[in-house]
Image (tube, rainbow, N blue to C red):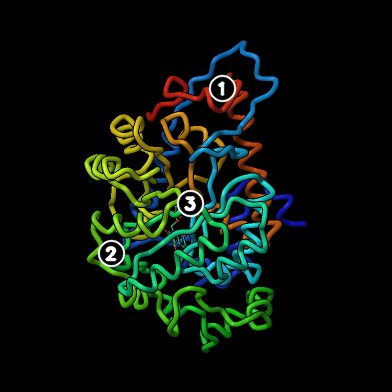
Amino acid sequence: QRVAGAADVAGLRLMARRRAPRMVFDYVDGAAEGERSMARAVEAFERVEFSPRVLRDVAEAPTAVEILGRRIAMPVVLGPTGFTRMMHREGEPAVARAAEDAGVPYTLSTMGTTTAGDVAAAAPGGWNWFQLYVVRDRARNLDVLSRAREAGMDVLVVTVDVPVAGARLRDVRHGLTVPPSLRWRSVLQAVRHPAWWFDFLTSEPLRFATVDGAPDDLAGITNLMFDPSVTVDDLGWIRSAWQEKLLVKGVQRVDDAKELAAVGVDGLVVSNHGGRQLDRAPTPLELLPEVVAAVGDRTEVFLDGGVRTGADVAAAVGLGAKACFIGRAYLYGLMAGGEPGVRRVLDLLRAELVRTLQLLGVGDVTELGPDAVRLR
Ligand code: FNR
């Protein structure tokens, strides 16, 4: 009810902040070190200047695009996020269902709290993707991939910007444990966020679905499990274990993009992990046009980081992205109100995208180009 009245994602963010305990909200809202990469990603969208044409027929402004050989309802992909059931008990299945109904893909994370099979069961008609973090134990990687494949997932997103965990200082300050534990500090928090705690204490214990061990601090488990020695050569065995589409997420330089295009990946995501890894990394929206110019004819280029509105989606597509991944935007909706909150986010993005196209005098999203968008 409340989420349906939210005017924009920023409004849902404020609702999320009220509903969730501070340490949970900050796990989503925060980024690494001085949080400059995140701030710059958002600020880059503020510098977008649109150049509208007038007297164009914009009676309809279709938003469907084709990516990786398939049509989707708008150029948006729900990106992978770990530990999604911590934000709301409905977790990954709710996000996957909302994505299915909106006609856009959903990406399940290696650090997810729902199995690939359960995501597929929740959204059997959805386009469900899987994101891989390469862990030290090779057999485990293969096992995880085959389970994703068995669940019908046919796009693999290999995230390459986490050789080690970034330093998320808000989590350190809060002493965030995953799952959150009810210590004296959180008891105080529980009084202020009763609905979240009620849900949390009455739902199934939070667990990683594909990573085992008792998670405590996320950085600890990341550094223990993830393989920091992965190189571009490893894409070879990943390729042989995965015959479907393959994307690499976390590309931050033109030379790396060229190297990856040369080995034949199906797509790249220009991303700095929402600013959660290396602080002061390149700003995705600024880097995008160079990457598209260098490899856009050989591989599909996607972008993430800082996308909060449909106008942001229009800007990124105008500057050459096939589609945008979103992270925090849908998590704010989920935290604010479960599945209806995620639905609200996707409805908002679509309506904002349509309106932006119409005001821009662009009659179809596929006609958006750099003539309509520049960075001030
Ligand atoms: C992430 N992200 C992420 N990426 C990934 O490849 N695997 C993962 O498990 C996670 N987990 C995760 C958790 C949370 C809480 C956030 C906010 C982000 C990064 C995510 O896929 C994406 O790159 C960023 O979220 C994009 O930036 P915005 O849209 O959040 O600004």
Label 3: element kind: strand
N-terminal of the pair, mark 3 or mark 1, is 3
Q: Is residue 67 above or below residue 32?
A: above
Residue positioned 26% across, 40% down in the render: 262
Q: Which residue is mark 3?
A: 155
**Which residue extends farthest right?**
1
Dot in front, 3 or 2:
3
- Tell me the quarter of the picture where residue 206 sits: bottom right
Real-space Cα separation, disc 3 to disc 1, in angstroms: 33 Å
Regarding ligand 1, which quadrant of the image does it lie in?
bottom left
Q: Which residue is mark 1?
A: 360
Q: Quadrant of the N terminus?
A: bottom right
Q: Which residue is mark 2?
A: 163
Name the side, left or right, on which 194 lies relative to 284.
right
Label 2: element kind: loop
**Which residue extends farthest bottom?**
184
Q: Amino acid at mark 3?
A: Val
Q: Residues within 10 Å of mark 3 (few under 14, many from 20)?
A: many
Q: Quadrant of the C terminus?
A: top left
Rendering coords of residue 343 (x, y %)? 68, 52
Q: Amino acid at mark 2?
A: Pro
